[in-house]
Amino acid sequence: MHSLFLLIDTIIGLYIWLLIGSAVLSWLVVFNVVNTRNRGVIAIGDFLYRVTEPALRPIRRLMPHMGGIDISPVILILLLIFAQNLIREYGFASSHGFGALAGFPVA
């Protein structure tokens, strides 16, 4: 069970880095730092958009319009860090025999 919690924790950490990469790439495109005609930039941007947009879209729908400032990645990163901390707390408790205290069934 501990391995499952570590896997989920690692996936959340990787997704956080993908969100950061997507935000940085969008800034680089807006400030015309990267060449948007480069196939590599297009491929990376498309990949990051396809991976991050499904999670960001519901947050953007709930957020009021802030004049061109998109803070949905920040909100999602904070939620993911919160989920990561919960997994670390309860995953640690269940892997050391305290699963009943953490709300997980003890095998």
Image (cartoon, rainbow, N blue to C red):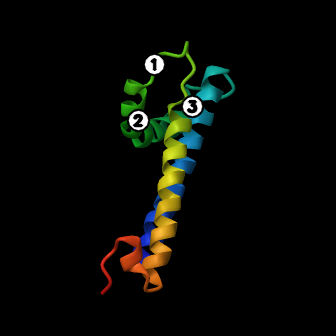
- Compared across the picture, whether 74 is left or right of 7 comes to right
SS state under label 1? loop
Q: Report x, y in % for residue 51.
A: 41, 43
**SS type, badge 2:** helix
Q: Quadrant of residue 3?
A: bottom left
The spot of residue 37 in percent (x, y) is 55, 25
Distance from Cα at disc 2 to Cα at disc 1: 18 Å
Q: Secondary structure at mark 3?
A: loop
Residue type of the residue flagged with mark 3? Asn
Closer to viewer: mark 2 or mark 1? 1
Question: Which residue is the site of mark 3?
Answer: 38
In the rendered image, which quarter contains the N terminus? bottom left
Q: CA distance from mark 3 to mark 2?
A: 22 Å
Q: Is residue 26 visible?
A: yes
Residue at the spot 54% in from the left edge and 49% down from the top edge: 16
What is the crowding at mark 3: few (fewer than 14 residues within 10 Å), some, or many (at least 20)? few
Outermost residue toward the top in this view: 67
Residue corresponding to mark 2: 53
Circle 2 Cα neighbour tier, 10 Å, few/some/many (<14 / 14–19 / ≥20):
some
- Seen at 48% across and 15% down, the residue is 65
Q: Earlier in the sequence, mark 2 or mark 1?
A: 2
| Residue 27 relative to residue 52: left or right | right
Q: Is residue 94 left or right of residue 106?
A: right
Q: Relative to 7, does residue 75 appear above or below in the rendering?
A: above
Question: Does 32 appear above or below 2?
Answer: above
